[in-house]
Image (cartoon, rainbow, N blue to C red):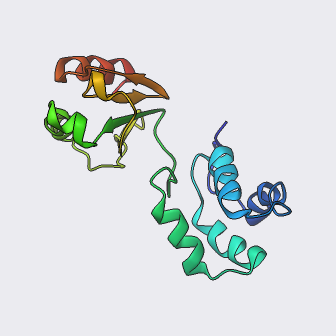
Amino acid sequence: MPYATGEPTAEQISAVMEDFITLEGPLLPMLHGLQSEFGYVPQAAVELIAEALNLSKAEVHGVISFYHDFRKAPAGRHVVKICRAEACQAVGGEALGEAVLAKLGLDWHGTTRNGAVTLEPVYCLGLCACAPAAMVDGKVIGRVTEDRMTRILQEAGA
């Protein structure tokens, strides 16, 4: 369950890190643990992780920015991911994504002002035969049309 009140302290971040420090190759599990606990990887964690693992801050930042699933800010109450892979693009996924971005007034990785929805791109949900595909709060949905996405967004409070 994501942490709900303000920025986590160095002590709170370190407490999460302790669960992973003894693992072989602890960086990714540590980042996943932080995101699971706080809903994102706090900027303050970069330096703490670098020191704990004898890495540079640039190396830690590079890993965080390489993997699309790590967030630098908390997500909205609902996370909507729209597939951007070729199979989905071939059957309207590009237009669907652009329509949703315009409707919500967001860029990818943005969150609506009311905090209801975060919109993220994803590069294959494995539902190519039922494209275009989306994922809403971890549930994969196939054959998504603009109308269907509008209903999904309304239900989410966007």
Q: Is residue 94 left or right of residue 72?
A: left
- Residue, x 51% and y 72% (percent of image)? 62
From the viewer's side, name the closer residue of 42 and 135: 135
Where does the C terminus fall, quadrant-wise?
A: top left
- Residue 44, x across and y down, in percent: 63, 68
Report x, y in % for residue 88.
Answer: 23, 34
Please indicate, yes or no, whether residue 5 appears anywhere in the rendered image: no
Note whether residue 127 is visible.
yes
Which quadrant is the N terminus positioned in? top right
Q: Position of residue 8 (x, y in %)?
A: 68, 57
The vertical placement of 98 against 156, above or below, is below
Farthest-out residue, front: 129
Identify the residue at image location x=83%, y=54%. 19
Give the left or right position of residue 85, taking residue 52 as reference. Answer: left
Query: What number of labels is visible?
Result: 0
Residue at the location (60% across, 79% down)? 57
Query: Toward which corner of the image does residue 45 lie, by quadrant?
Result: bottom right
Figure check: 120 above or below 158: below
Above or below, comparing residue 77 to residue 86 in the picture = above
> Where residue 83 sits in the image (x, y, percent)?
31, 37
In the image, 97 versus 75, the foreground residue is: 97
Q: Is residue 10 left or right of residue 109?
A: right
**Residue closest to the eye, 132 or 103:** 132
Q: Quadrant of residue 128?
A: top left
The reply, left or right, for residue 136 in relation to residue 84 is: right
Quarter of the image holding residue 46?
A: bottom right
Q: Residue at x 80, y 57 (%)?
A: 20
129 up-or-down from 22: above or below: above
